[in-house]
Image: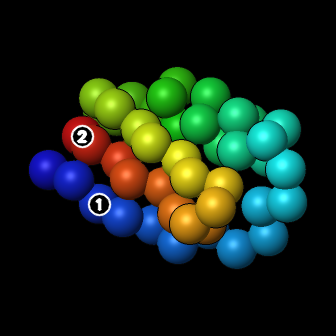
Amino acid sequence: MRKVFKINGMTCVNCQRTIQIGLKKTKGVEDIDVSLVLERAIVSF
């Protein structure tokens, strides 16, 4: 299953990386793609 999340307030690459690392640690998450430019995360689980 894949879900797209809108992420408001990301202002830099560090924000993007922090979100990506945090979501990867979440149980059940298989893949994560966080886009700073598009302000969204696509999570596969």
Which x, y percent locates residue 1? 14, 50
Mark 2 Cα shell of 10 Å, populated few (<14), some (14-19), many (≥20) = few
Residue 15 in the image, given as x and y percentages of width and height: 79, 46
11 up-or-down from 14: above or below: below
Q: At which x and y percent is residue 45? A: 24, 40
Residue pushed farthest left? 1
Name the residue that disc number 2 marks: 45
Q: Is residue 32 above or below residue 43?
A: above
The residue labelled by disc 1 is 3
Q: Residue at x 79, y 41 (%)?
A: 13
Q: Secondary structure at mark 1?
A: strand
Which amino acid does the dot numbered 2 rest on? Phe
Residue at 85% from the left image edge and 50% from the top image edge: 12
| Horizontal side, residue 14 vs residue 7: left or right | right
Amino acid type of disc 1?
Lys
Q: Secondary structure at mark 2?
A: loop
Residue 30's image quarter?
A: top left
- C-alpha span from label 2 to label 1: 8 Å
Above/below status of 34 relative to 40:
above
Q: Which label is found at residue 29?
A: none
